[in-house]
Image (cartoon, rainbow, N blue to C red):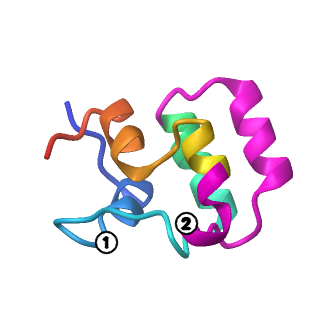
């Protein structure tokens, strides 16, 4: 069953290229919780990411921890 709601909608800013860019850090952390990302990764994101989350600035952290939009949507049960 796909997850819906404001956090999922925040990842669906474009039907072709979902993004976390510009997402408030608290909303991003909520997305991580909903996607069942390990708590230590969420804590690291909270400590290291700026508000709002920016894919260009924070890209290395996001990719290193498997937190790009495609992977998050996959964790949350979304399909292309």
The residue under label 1 is: 13
Please give left or right for residue 68 compared with residue 52 in the image: left
Confirm or deny contact between disc 1 and disc 2 (CB under 8 A): no
Q: How far from the left and from the top, in percent, is residue 36? A: 52, 26
Q: Secondary structure at mark 2?
A: helix
Which labelled disc corresponds to residue 59?
A: none
* Extreme residue in the left direction: 80
For residue 4, above or below residue 14: above
Identify the residue shown where x is 67% and y is 73%. Answer: 52
Identify the residue shown where x is 23% and y is 40%. Answer: 78
7 and 22: which one is in front? 22
Q: Secondary structure at mark 1?
A: loop
Q: Quadrant of residue 6?
A: bottom left
Which of label 1 and label 2 is nearer to you? 2
Secondary structure of the magenta portion, mostly? helix
| Real-space CA distance between mark 1 and mark 2, rounded to the nearest whole angstrom | 14 Å
The residue under label 2 is: 55
Q: Earlier in the sequence, mark 1 or mark 2?
A: 1
10 and 40: which one is in front? 40
Q: Which residues are magenta?
A: 35-60
Q: How far from the left and from the top, in percent, is residue 31? A: 52, 47
Q: Dot 1, crowdedness within 10 Å: few (<14), some or many (≥20)?
A: few
Q: Quadrant of the N terminus?
A: top left
Identify the residue shown where x is 31% and y is 35%. Answer: 74
């Amino acid at each position: 069953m796909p997850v819906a709601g404001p956090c999922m909608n925040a990842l669906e800013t474009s039907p072709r290229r979902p993004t976390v860019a510009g997402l408030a850090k608290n909303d991003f952390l909520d997305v991580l919780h909903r996607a069942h990302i390990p708590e230590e990764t969420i804590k690291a994101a909270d400590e290291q990411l700026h508000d709002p989350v920016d894919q260009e600035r924070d890209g290395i952290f996001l990719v290193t921890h498997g937190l790009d939009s495609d992977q998050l949507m996959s964790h949350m049960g979304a399909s292309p």
